[in-house]
Amino acid sequence: MKIIAVLNQKGGSGKTTTSVNLAATLAEAGKRVLLIDLDPQASASLWYGFKEKGKGLYNLLTEDVGFETAIENTSIERLSMVPSSQILAGLEKTLANEMAAESILKDKLHKMTDKPFDYVLIDCPPTLGILALNALTMAHEVLIPVEAHVMALHGLVQLLKTVNLVKQRLNPNLEIAGILPCRVDMRTKHSQEVLDQLRTRFEGQVCRSVIRENVRLAEAPLHLKPITQYDANCNGTHDYRTLAQEILSRNSTPSTETSAHLSD
Ligand SMILES: Nc1ncnc2c1ncn2[C@@H]1O[C@H](COP(=O)(O)OP(=O)(O)OP(=O)(O)O)[C@@H](O)[C@H]1O
Ligand SMILES: [Mg+2]
């Protein structure tokens, strides 16, 4: 089981679009996927048609209940979800005074006896609070979507520093899965330049896959479908399938790794 946190503290960078559609393309490729929506905005949950179902996640973080109580089935084969809701917004304050609040989800996932998932994807909120820390503490890897715009690069160095701090203090096994250029418009010089800059400044850390600007990706949530089901032949579907293949080709890790990681 591989746990990937989709994180960028910058709002609107493509975290939810990536979590929702990568979850779908990994499931389509035959993998069993759990998508955890850790954002109180609940965009990923709404995308899959869950409205105010996030009490399960709230209870999971605040009460003595098991991880399985928060898992729901989706309409997509092999894809399950832990939905979020606005009630999570008040949680940062509640949990701030609690001991080891950043490892609640990791500990509970570890205690689950049957973990029938190959991939766990976590859609993080655009703030680096207790919720995002829970994601970084339980994750093996961080996938960082960035909008292909020069302004979007500014926060990236700080974000990588934060990930490194978490690695030193909370989760020594944490790695960068990759920086994922999103909303790339190959026709513009600006997009090309930003891509070049990313690949030069963050050499070896940028994904080979690129997610192009595609209006179908922006339309899909209104239809409560991942891009694969909304338009199987558009650029968005093609790009998230390519990303799934890139992730699959890198992560041929045996399932025992998670138990080892989660128990240390
Ligand atoms: N490749 C793309 N092509 C076109 N539109 C896109 C693409 N990726 C994302 N968008 C649009 O950009 C906006 C922001 O994307 P998204 O919600 O995925 O970002 P986010 O990082 O999850 O935002 P937040 O920080 O608020 O959670 C949305 O309106 C989405 O539809
Ligand atoms: Mg989002």
Image: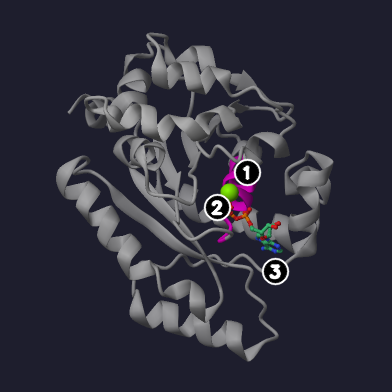
Q: Is residue 219 above or below residue 129?
A: below
On whether ligand 1 comes within 8 Å of the CB at mark 3, the answer is: yes
Q: Looking at numbered disc 2 in the image, what kind of residue is underneath it?
A: Lys
Q: Position of residue 99 (x, y in %)?
A: 22, 25
> Alpha-carbon distance for marks 1 and 2?
9 Å
> Alpha-carbon distance for marks 3 and 2?
14 Å
Q: Earlier in the sequence, mark 3 or mark 1?
A: 1
On whether ligand 1 comes within 8 Å of the CB at mark 1, the answer is: yes
Label 3 residue SS? loop
Q: Is residue 111 above or below residue 79?
A: above
What's the mark number on residue 15? 2
> Bounds of the magenta span?
13-25
Q: Is residue 169 above or below residue 1?
A: below
Q: Looking at numbered disc 3 in the image, what kind of residue is underneath it?
A: Glu
Q: Which residue is mark 3?
A: 213
Q: Which residue is mark 1?
A: 20
> Alpha-carbon distance for marks 3 and 1?
16 Å
What's the mark number on residue 75? none
- Residue neighbourhood size for the residue with mark 3, other residues' Cα within 10 Å, grouped as few (<14), some (14–19), many (≥20): some
Task: Determine the quadrant in which ligand 1 lies.
Answer: bottom right
Q: Looking at numbered disc 1 in the image, what kind of residue is underneath it?
A: Val
- Number of labels in the image equals 3
Find the residue positioned furthest to the bottom. 189
Residues at discs 3 and 1 in contact (Cβ within 8 Å): no
Viewer can see residue 71: no
Dominant secondary structure of the residues highlighted in magenta in the image: helix
Residue 8 falls within the magenta-colored stretch = no
Q: Earlier in the sequence, mark 1 or mark 2?
A: 2
Q: Nearer the viewer, residue 242 or 140?
A: 140
